[in-house]
Image (tube, rainbow, N blue to C red):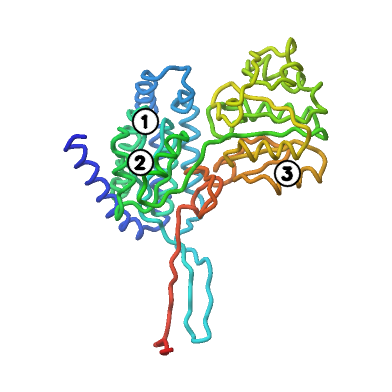
């Protein structure tokens, strides 16, 4: 650690705290203008952003599962700008009266939505997160501290500089967003910044999330790894099942909602080559299959086929790899999910209503699906504009988190001279 970086961090945290007080006074019209302007600037600065991103990408092997997460291109920048506009257009939650009542003594109580204050988000190699966090925090009148990794630091510097410029142009403090030093050694300082940061949200690998949880002195909302299962029941429509599992696995392999393990009811074992046909012929997905699945696929699967070991279940692959487990029925599938799930996203493909309802009711996960792809676990897809993460815990927030989850509340009590009697 060097003194200049330490001073930079301490001053940045202190300024973010002060900026949060100013933000609390802003009206939503100004916030919308800032986000619309940033969307325009992101497109106008495409060359600068992509050059910085290319610099980051040059330090990473293309075979690294994080490469796709780090990659920006014109299409992804256009999607980012669209998300910024979507967030801008959403109703602002701060100031909303969540509950109101009058007591017998005449006191009027209102439960009012308020900002958290300063939110720190710790993430790895996804520069789109920089935009999402800023937009959602600004919309909820929270200052944000961004602790990205060294992998994406060149991109993040350019993006945060754009944010500072746009904030200043609208007469708002650039200190509302602070980019912390990227080195891992500074993370404990952020996690122990009691009095400066109100909430920390880690986004990334299991190792990062565990480190944040174990070392934080400030409140944390965990966004867990996605170990995702899809169970195909004997009652399933097979054409639908093939389409769903292929999409869940191959749409974008580096995201946390991508399929990791296919659970197939044993009655459908002869249909497994058909279900996996596109996975092998088109996408060349590498499959780790248990003995029954391996014997069914051997000689009929176009991709690489390997025998599954214990470690291939309960693994988040983040690549064109997956495992297959043959089960006797729903109960065995539920037991497998209970053992290996990270409680992120789990799906059933079936036509039998009783089977579907039993699955949806018994699986303990942030999002459970019937007859659709797990690829929809996403704040934008859920109509939230964007997301700050997907919580796999149960306290305060669960599933995709956006504007409501970045707020707290306070009780406002209005009286007319009431005093409380002595007991």
> In the image, which is nearer the foreground, mark 3 or mark 1?
3
Q: Which mark is residue 359?
A: 3
- Neighbourhood count class around disc 3 (C-alpha, 10 Å): few under 14, some 14–19, many 20 upward: many
Q: Residue 146 carries which label?
A: 2
Viewer-proximal residue, 355 or 110?
355
| Disc 2 from disc 1: Cα separation | 21 Å
Residue at the extreme top:
299
In the image: residue 228, left or right of residue 41: right
User: Residue 205 placed where, x, y %?
Assistant: 46, 33
Place residue 151 in its image quadrant: top left
In the image: residue 242, left or right of residue 381: right
Residue at the extreme left:
3
Judge whether 112 appears above or below 35 on screen. Answer: below
Q: Which residue is drawn at 40% across and 39% down?
A: 211
Secondary structure beneath label 1: loop
The answer to which of marks 2 and 3 sits earlier in the sequence is: 2
Judge whether 79 appears above or below 167 on screen. Answer: above
**Quarter of the N terminus within the rendering:** top left
The answer to which of marks 2 and 1 sits earlier in the sequence is: 1
**Quarter of the C terminus within the rendering:** bottom left
- Neighbourhood count class around disc 2 (C-alpha, 10 Å): few under 14, some 14–19, many 20 upward: many
Q: Mark 1 points at which residue?
A: 45
Secondary structure beneath label 3: helix
User: Residue 287 placed where, x, y %?
Assistant: 64, 19
User: Residue 91 placed where, x, y %?
Assistant: 51, 55
């Amino acid at each position: 650690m060097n003194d200049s970086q330490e001073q930079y961090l301490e001053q940045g945290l202190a300024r973010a705290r002060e900026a949060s007080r100013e933000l609390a006074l802003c009206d939503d019209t100004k916030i919308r203008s800032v986000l619309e302007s940033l969307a325009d600037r992101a497109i106008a600065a495409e060359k600068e952003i992509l050059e910085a991103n290319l610099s980051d990408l040059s330090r990473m092997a293309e075979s690294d599962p994080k490469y796709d997460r780090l990659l920006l291109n014109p299409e992804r920048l256009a999607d980012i700008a669209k998300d910024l506009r979507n967030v801008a257009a959403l109703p602002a939650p701060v100031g909303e009266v969540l509950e109101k009542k009058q007591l017998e003594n005449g006191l009027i109580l209102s439960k009012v939505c308020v900002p958290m204050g300063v939110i720190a988000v710790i993430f790895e190699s996804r520069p789109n997160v920089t935009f999402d966090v800023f937009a959602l925090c600004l919309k909820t009148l929270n200052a944000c501290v961004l602790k990205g990794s060294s992998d994406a630091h060149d991109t993040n510097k350019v993006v945060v500089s754009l944010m500072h410029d746009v904030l200043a142009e609208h007469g708002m403090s650039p200190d509302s967003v602070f980019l912390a030093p990227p080195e891992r050694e500074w993370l404990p300082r952020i996690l122990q910044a009691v009095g400066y940061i109100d909430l920390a949200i880690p986004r990334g690998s299991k190792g990062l999330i565990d480190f944040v949880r174990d070392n934080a002195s400030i409140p944390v909302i965990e966004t867990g790894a996605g170990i995702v299962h899809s169970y195909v029941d004997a009652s399933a429509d097979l054409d639908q099942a093939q389409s769903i599992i292929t999409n869940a696995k191959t749409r974008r392999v580096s995201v946390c909602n991508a399929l990791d393990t296919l659970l197939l009811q044993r009655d459908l074992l002869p249909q497994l080559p058909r279900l996996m046909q596109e996975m092998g012929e088109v996408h060349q997905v590498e499959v780790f299959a248990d003995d029954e699945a391996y014997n069914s696929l051997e000689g009929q699967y176009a991709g690489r086929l390997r025998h599954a070991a214990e470690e291939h279940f309960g693994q988040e692959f983040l690549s064109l790899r997956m495992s297959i487990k043959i089960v006797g029925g729903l109960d065995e599938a539920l037991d497998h999910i209970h053992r290996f799930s990270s409680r992120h996203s789990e799906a059933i493909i079936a036509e039998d209503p009783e089977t579907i309802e039993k699955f949806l009711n018994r699986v303990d996960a942030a999002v459970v699906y019937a007859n659709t792809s797990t690829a929809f676990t996403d704040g934008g897809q859920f109509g939230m504009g964007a997301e700050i993460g997907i919580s796999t815990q149960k306290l305060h927030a669960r599933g995709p988190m956006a504007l409501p989850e970045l707020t707290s509340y306070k009780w406002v009590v209005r009286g007319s001279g009431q005093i409380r009697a002595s007991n």
